[in-house]
Amino acid sequence: MNVEQPNPGKNEAVPFSPAERRRLTVFGAPAELVLVPERAARPGKPSADRLLFCTDVVTRILAEETSWQDESIAITPNRYPFAAAQQIYWARRRTREHDAVFLASVFAAVDGCGGAGMINNIGAAASIPHAHAHVTSERLPFLGALRTLPLTADWFSPSTSVSLVAADLPLCLIGVRGPAAARALAVAALQMCRMTAAVNMVMQDGTTWLYPRSAIETPAPHFPYALGAAEVWGRWCYSDRAAFTAATSATLERALTTAGCAALAV
């Protein structure tokens, strides 16, 4: 499976063309800030006045925009991209949860294209409650530049095919490393141990990173939007120029610690 659409003539990926870019270091690792004003128009985006319930839009999206599908996933473009050649992988089963079958398909696609994948759920910047993932041909250096420590946990025993690490940060960021299929089983099992309501995931370089969320989805004033997997990946997306210009390394570090949970003991 490839990040490129099997039928690109039907629904080509929307070009990612930020109006402006900045670069900073966050916890000593390189991060990028992008100004993407069009993302302000994204329907259903998390905000204080978002409706508690919404009409199911996924049925229509899949009927009108699917470029490829099999028994477990359907692929559509992202109309409000935050990365190059970005596609959305949807679970064809009507579910909010990202199960092992869905995760295995996404992890294999990311490994196959050499890019990255991202997952948000409601409470962690998702605008739609149906299980989905973002897959891009891009790779960013942020996560790979973080120092990591081996992680052992008495509450979880992964298979010998995967290993766990923790980023050496003042917040909880866990990496699961190993082949896509084994990693999917481990990550799905970890979700049955997670006690937080929300989580972000980022997949790149054979590692799936999990960022359990605090109750704070939008860590204002440090970051004025719902913080999502794109920011954990290392790309901070702004629709407002003033906020984009005012951001500093310190405010982004504070945003990650505020939206996340305390680091685990390793």
Image (tube, rainbow, N blue to C red):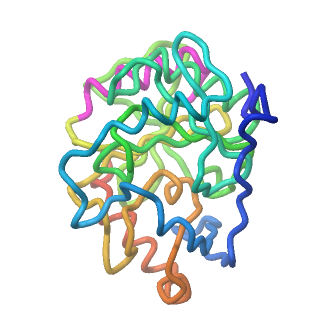
21 sits to left or right of 186: right
Is 179 within the magenta?
yes
116 sits to left or right of 246: right
Question: Magenta residues, as a range?
Answer: 177-194
Residue 229 placed where, x, y %?
48, 51
The structure residue drawn at horizontal position 72% and vertical position 33%, both measured from the top left corner, is: 3
The structure residue drawn at horizontal position 52% and vertical position 73%, both measured from the top left corner, is: 238
Q: Quadrant of the C terminus?
A: top left
Q: Quadrant of the N terminus?
A: top right
Q: How many numbered marks appear?
A: 0
**With respect to residue 84, does 115 lie above or below?**
above
157 sits to left or right of 105: left
Is 88 within the magenta?
no
Residue 105 placed where, x, y %?
58, 20
The structure residue drawn at horizontal position 54% and vertical position 10%, both measured from the top left corner, is: 71
- Residue 141 vs residue 150, the one in the foreground: 141
**With respect to residue 197, does 243 lie above or below?**
below
Q: Quadrant of residue 66?
A: top right
Q: Residue furthest top?
A: 71
- Residue 257 vs residue 9, the one in the foreground: 9
The structure residue drawn at horizontal position 64% and vertical position 42%, both measured from the top left corner, is: 77
